[in-house]
Amino acid sequence: MQKSLILFFTVLSFICNAQIIKTKRGIVSLDGTHVAKITNKSNEYTFMDLKETPIFTVEFVDKSVVDSVRDSYVKINRVYNREKTLDLDYISPSAFSGDEKSAVYTCIKGLKIIDERGINIKNLDELFKNMPKRKLDSKTKEAYTIRTKIDKLNLEVNSVGEILSNGVPVGYFTNLPVSFGSDDRVTDKTFIDIEIYDAKSKYIGKYITTTKQIKTAGGKTFTLYREMSGRASILKYPTYKAIAERMAILDPNFIKIQEKVIVGDVVKDGVEKDKK
């Protein structure tokens, strides 16, 4: 009986202390009191005080990190001091909440930079002073690690099918379809696989056009995907660059990070020679 009473009063206390958050016609209300105003342009929301002085912005970001892994977060910036931008996780009142509700809910419940008195400048400044770190799951962390490696490789595929890393040839494609050169995507379905070799003509692997799979010489396989609407994954036509990037991740020995070659002045015996 005593435990039941404790549970009852705990739930009752929670209900009584629950804040009612509403946004109507650009006015944010907390428990029936107007506390802020909000406007938006595309996916960026500007929060203002009740005198319509802009204080800070919340921008929603939904981007592909690598392959089918996406990352969604918000960028927060102060209008009066834009030296720092915070990348933060956001919270939503429900799975079906739109960006506006999520922005308001995050500012009130998550970051506590809006309260019953309005926009809390002290808490806002404290937020930028002690910048919180995002909580990424293991899958997203791994995706960012892969993305960093790919960016360092700085791969590109030239008009003859050579793969270059920071301008240095590191491999090439063979069995290229007739569309190569006019389209950077692999849209043809052929029974001849597109093969990849390193700069020393060692076979690295292949791209199977009928299944959109990459298969390394060592037997590893990977299917290229993309994201639709930030949620559902569907197959797409990959670019030659994307195939080379994924092959470099599957086979770490395929491409080593190449630094850009910078050619300086030609000097002999301490004397600069004339350039031709």
Image (cartoon, rainbow, N blue to C red):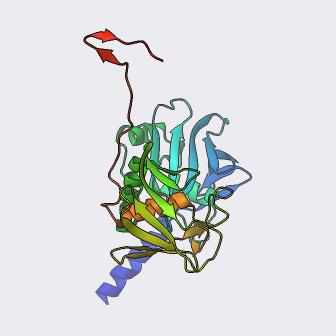
Is residue 114 or residue 167 the one in the foreground? 167
In-front residue for pair 183/57: 183
Q: Which residue is outermost to the top?
A: 271
In this rendering, would 97 be left or right of 144? right
Quarter of the image where one finds residue 97: bottom right
Q: Residue at x 34, y 65 (%)?
A: 251
Q: Within the image, what quadrant is residue 217 found in?
A: bottom left
Image quadrant in which the N terminus is located? bottom left
Residue 57 image offset from top left, x and y in percent: 58, 42
Q: Residue furthest left?
A: 269
> For this view, does 108 lie left or right of residue 126?
right
Along the viewing direction, whichever of 70 and 8 lies nearer the viewer: 70
Q: Is residue 94 left or right of residue 134?
A: right
- x then y, percent, for residue 197: 41, 63
Which corner quadrant of the image does residue 3 belong to?
bottom left
Q: Outermost residue toward the right?
A: 25
State whether residue 55 appears in this view. yes
In x, y percent, where is residue 188? 65, 72
Q: Nearer the viewer, residue 215 or 235?
A: 215
Residue occupying image coordinates x 47% and y 64%: 17
Image x and y of residue 90, in percent:
49, 58
Tally of numbered discs: 0
Q: In the image, is residue 114 above or below residue 252?
A: above
Side (left or right) of 235 relative to 154: right
> Farthest bottom residue?
1
Whether residue 134 can be seen here: no
